[in-house]
Image (tube, grey):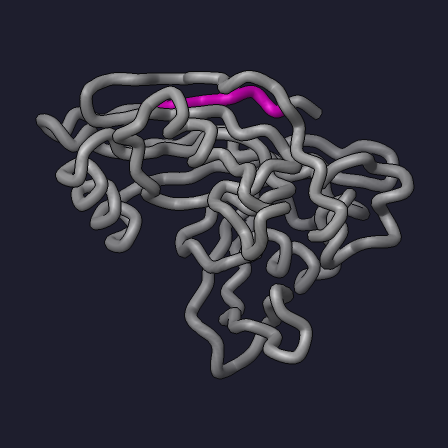
Amino acid sequence: MSDYDPPQDPLVILHHDHELLVLDKPAGLLSVPGKGEHLADCLIARAQARFPSALLVHRLDRDTSGVIVFAMTPNAQRHLGLQFEKRATKKFYVARVAGRLEPRGGEVDAPIRVDWPNRPLQMIAEDGRPAQTGWRVQRYDEGETRVRLMPKTGRSHQLRLHMKHIGHPILGDPLYYPESTATYPRLMLHSEELRLRHPDGGAQMVFRSKAPF
């Protein structure tokens, strides 16, 4: 992370009201600060500079782009936190993975835990926490597959690990498929859609961001 050089694009606001702030996070920007002053620049700090009451609900990996929600009140933070905890939210990602992923749909069920000697890497392990990811192929391109990923759980690096686990790592992944980064300038993983209930009244909300790749 010593080479941390986040993009300086202005905030992209997908939705804002008295309880919710939904942003389109750029790839290369931390969701929350890392350890050390050089890792202080992050999405929540930028959000709070403009919306001082914004509170963390969930996070995206530094290298992942797309839809992320913040709470505007402590009540909304609790409400949204419970939705994520109880898996009441629905998350959809788009990714470009190596090779021809077959069949056209399926699910990975493989537990994940920290790879302690190699932190922050994670690993598939029988003693890990349960993790499930559904997939649906969108199209095949030369040497790669564009796929929609539907995580049922929210483990750290889950999508990246699960795709590698079934032999189709996400292209441009500096942690789990570094040999592809010379060809792909960023991690080809984007949070495309998030569905949740509004903390005030419970209406179903859908937020989308088109993948930039």
Q: Is residue 147 visible?
A: no
**Relative to residue 58, is residue 197 depicted above or below?**
above
Q: Quadrant of residue 76?
A: top left
**Relative to residue 86, is residue 7 depicted above or below?**
above
Q: Is residue 44 left or right of residue 26?
A: left
**Rendered location of residue 166, percent (x, y):** 68, 61
| Residue 210 colored in magenta in the image | yes
Q: Which residues are magenta?
A: 206-211
**Rendered location of residue 190, percent (x, y):** 59, 34
**Rendered location of residue 67, percent (x, y):** 46, 30
Residue 57 or 88: which is nearer the viewer? 57
Residue 158 or 117: which is nearer the viewer? 117
Instruction: Give the residue drawn at x 51%, y 22%.
Output: 209
Q: Quadrant of residue 146?
A: top right
**Relative to residue 81, is residue 196 depicted above or below?**
above
Instruction: Give the residue drawn at x 27%, y 24%.
Output: 205
Instruction: Give the residue drawn at x 38%, y 45%.
Output: 58
Q: Is residue 203 left or right of residue 45?
A: left
| Residue 209 colored in magenta in the image | yes
**Rendered location of residue 127, percent (x, y):** 48, 82
Instruction: Give the residue furthest to the front.
Output: 37
Instruction: Give the residue furthest to the bottom.
Output: 127
Instruction: Give the residue drawn at x 66%, y 28%.
Output: 7
Query: Which quadrant does the C terminus fall into?
Result: top right
Q: Is residue 132 left or right of residue 211?
A: left
